[in-house]
Amino acid sequence: AQSVTQLDSHVSVSEGTPVLLRCNYSSSYSPSLFWYVQHPNKGLQLLLKYTSAATLVKGINGFEAEFKKSETSFHLTKPSAHMSDAAEYFCVVSITLTNAGKSTFGDGTTLTVKP
Amino acid sequence: EPEVTQTPSHQVTQMGQEVILRCVPISNHLYFYWYRQILGQKVEFLVSFYNNEISEKSEIFDDQFSVERPDGSNFTLKIRSTKLEDSAMYFCASSIEGPHTDTQYFGPGTRLTVL
């Protein structure tokens, strides 16, 4: 079984300050982990993914995440928030013994960026 | 850049009616998925499809639901007799490989409203 927990339902930062969105996962096997962003009334866009290569993953728009197996975490960070970063962020875990299967989404974190 | 498309963007139907949601995955992708997101809630996996058959489905995906790839380009989700609680945003996704190793590309979603 697999599960993912996003530790904060809402995060509010000021423009230009760092962003930290926390994600912990549970998995019986080596997981793949993803962060997606959803802007209002839009679809889901991939920010970055970890699939057993480098543990520090860089994504689009200045975001990055570090896979820490010992802490079962995959937190998303950005050094300096921009107003356009305001959106819903989803941490996703995927594990399968075959190439079929599913992804499990976290509950989401709403990021608010104050001017 | 190729993208997943979904039609219609918004579907309104009466309870008990059948609806078909349509998706055109990215052309060289082999794995297809449906997810749904009830307003204000997390994104939930419904079903994955590979090699013309369902590879995995969730407990949500009961006998009221079915999927089909009627031709080489479309991937459909049918709900036979809609219920009020089926009102949600439905996302289609596709990937070249399975979800464990590959990015799922999501469409913009179809908002289903059941009255």
Image: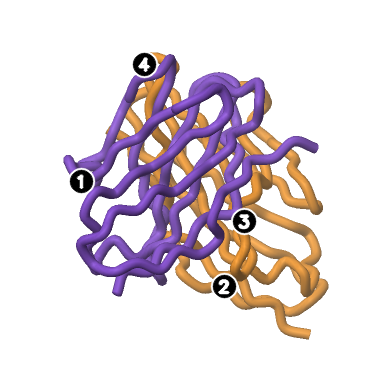
Chain colours: A orange, B purple
Label 2 close to label 4 by CB (< 8 Å): no
Label 1 close to label 4 by CB (< 8 Å): no
* Amino acid type of the residue tagged 4 in the rendering: Leu
Between B20 and A11, the one lying in front of the other is: B20
Q: Position of residue A73 (x, y in %)?
A: 49, 43
**Chain letter belonging to callout 2:** A
* Amino acid type of the residue tagged 2 in the rendering: Val
Name the residue carrying label 2. A11
Q: Position of residue A110 (x, y in %)?
A: 55, 70
Real-space CA distance between mark 1 and mark 3, rounded to the nearest whole angstrom: 30 Å
**Chain letter belonging to callout 1:** B
**Is residue A64 positioned above or below A108 on the image?**
above
Q: Which mark is residue A37?
A: 3
Q: Which residue is at 23% across, 67% downward?
A: B15
Q: Position of residue B7 (x, y in %)?
A: 55, 51
Q: Which residue is at 54% across, 56% downward?
A: B8
Residue at the limit of the structure toward the left, as seen here: B63
Labels 1 and 4 in the same subunit: no
